[in-house]
Amino acid sequence: MKNKENSRQMSARESAAITIRAFRLLCRIYPGVIISMIANIIWKALTPYVGIWFSARIIGELAGGRSPEVLKSLVLLSLASAAGISLVGGILGRWADGESRRTWFAEEYLFVDKNLQMDFVRFDHPETRRLLHDIEGSRRNSGWGLPRLLWSLQDLIAPVFSILGGIALVISFFTNRVPESAGNWTVLDNPVFLVLLIAGMAGIPCISSLLANQGGKYYAMNNAKHSLENNLFSWFCFKGHDRAAAGDMRIYRIDKMCMKYGFDRKGLFSSQGYFANLARGKVGLLNLASNTVSHIFTLLVYLYVCLKAWAGAFGVGEITQYVGALSNIAGSMGQFLKVWGDVRNNAPFLRQTFEYLDLPNDMYQGSLTTEKRTDGDYEVEFRNVSFRYPGSETWALRNVTMKFRVGEHLAVVGCNGSGKTTFIKLLCRLYDPTAGLILLNGIDIRKYNYQQYMAIFAVVFQDFKLFPYTLAQNVAASGQYDSEKVRDCLLKAGFGERLEEMKDGLDTYLTKKRSDNGVDISGGEAQKIAIARALYKDAPFILLDEPTAALDPLAEAEVYARFHSIVGGRTAVYISHRLSSCRFCDKILVFSEGRIVQQGSHDALLREEQGVYAALWNAQAQYYV
Ligand code: ADP
């Protein structure tokens, strides 16, 4: 939430704690991935030493005993072990690969599930949106957060095992001493060399990884810039593939702006951009220095091992073994430290992830049942309700007081921004009032069980969404449905003719992407399907926010002519800009600047000649006279 907080440096302890917490989370959401990954890593880390060991024995035998029998057995064993290692490696690799396919989905689901469990009001809060946007940007664009931890884990565990395996192979390097007969060369056994070697093994990887991490920090520090540009880049460049944008792209030549992001040589990601300059400049130099330091050290190790062999401490064969093992240990330590640096750079992103996942649900949820009353008798009352959107200073609703009974048809009219949609959102408890009460049958709606309360409403929001499933699945909002009921609701919503034309009928996919017989539907058709979905829910209340905005005038007239039979005995609240459609409603609420300024029947409201309703009515009527 607080960007400054995220940029704050975290101590090694804090980084370790949050990383362990994230690791436990990863183990919980995809245990198979973690287990297969670790098995695979250990195998990969340890098996190279088998090859090194056999090479050493074979070279030793070639340079020493030269016994054909021994050589034959060594070569055969070496080949057999190589085959066995690669077979097991292949099996483990396939297992890990198969499991890893789930990672993206599992992680996405973690966030989607959190979003859906979150109180709507919290989810809609600008701070929450910003936090989620930041996390998603870092995650998708650069893998910061949970994905990077998974990558890092692989790179962190492998070196540990590699170091352990290496140590097992180099112990004899320290115990094999230069023979006295070598004269001055016995100096190579002087403990100073041993101390220097161990210090170098520990110190050089530190220096090398410190240098590399300095480079890595630049990327973490510039993540916000990277994310923003990546979003813009994707937005502009991928718009070129978007069919819906094709018209505007041509008319307004948006492609020129796309070119700026895609091909501008000075753009953030281009060959002369910020990151390319970093790679050529500071970061490149730091990486170069990091590699050079570790290569020089390997060279010195090589020299020392060769000199000890020259002096007779061990045979030629062991040179391969010791050099291989020592440079592997040094390389692995370097890798471990480098990745540890990466883990620390990643820790603030993990903190941000948990900040989101830990967001609490504060909305009070009672336990009263809404009891499906057999008499269907409900009464809704708004008592002096005022409301401000989270993070907003202005009142969207002010002192709204009204009542309506079940079965009534209520129209809500008013200019844009007057509070009509907000009224509906409060009624179905997406938000709680900032002040005042909403009552169902005389009881504060907060005291009802939240899921049960939501279940008594079927809503068609202005920005309703359909999904790329079949027509029937969209109407029923489920994979299981009653075909007759789906058809009936579609007919009531005026979708009958279009349904006749559909080859696959109710099984028609609402997108061409899923089937050749799929259809891409128009806005008006979508609106009818959304109305059918609301009817299918069989809820006692049906709330329609401009249900005919996308319909042509004929379809609109048809919906209104049959409105009463469409909604039946349900309580209907609908927002409309078409005032003629309100005439048949029992009651009309007129909103202005968040207040109900008039309420009553059409005729009664028209009689108030100076009222907002009369003004709105006359403004529309003049075009029809
Ligand atoms: P109407 O449906 O009458 O067009 P709304 O209920 O959508 O009006 O909006 C009422 C007021 O609340 C407007 O000033 C609008 O800008 C504001 N508003 C609507 N939604 C939000 C939101 N999510 N966050 C902040 N303000 C909002």
Image (cartoon, rainbow, N blue to C red):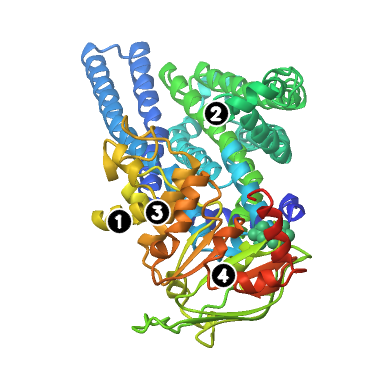
Helix, strand, or loop for circle 1? helix
Q: What residue does disc 3 label? A: 493
For the residues marked 3 and 4, what is the alpha-carbon distance in whole angstroms? 37 Å
Q: Earlier in the sequence, mark 1 or mark 2?
A: 2
Q: Work out how far the residue at label 1 is from the one at label 3, CA to CA, in angstroms.
A: 9 Å
User: Three-letter amino acid code at disc 2?
Assistant: Asp
Q: Could you tell me which residue is drawn at 44 percent across and 52 percent down?
A: 558
Q: Amino acid at mark 1?
A: Asp
Q: Amino acid at mark 4?
A: Asn
Assign the N terminus to one quadrant of the image. bottom right
Q: Is residue 528 above or below residue 355?
A: above
Q: Is mark 4 within 8 Å of ligand 1?
A: no
Eye-nearest disc, 3 or 4? 3
Helix, strand, or loop for circle 2?
A: loop
Distance from disc 4 to disc 1, alpha carbons, whole Å, reads 39 Å
Q: Is residue 522 left or right of residue 274?
A: left
State which tag comes first along the sequence, 4 or 1. 4
**Residue at position x 54%, y 25% in the image:** 241
Q: Is residue 225 left or right of residue 198?
A: right
Q: CA distance from mark 3 to mark 2?
A: 31 Å
Q: Nearer the viewer, mark 4 or mark 2?
A: 2
- In percent of width and height, residue 250 lies at 64, 21
| Residue 612 spot, x, y in % from top left | 73, 65
Q: Which residue is mark 1?
A: 488
Label 4 near label 3: C-beta < 8 Å?
Answer: no
Q: Which residue is mark 4?
A: 361
Residue 502 is drawn in which quadrant?
A: top left
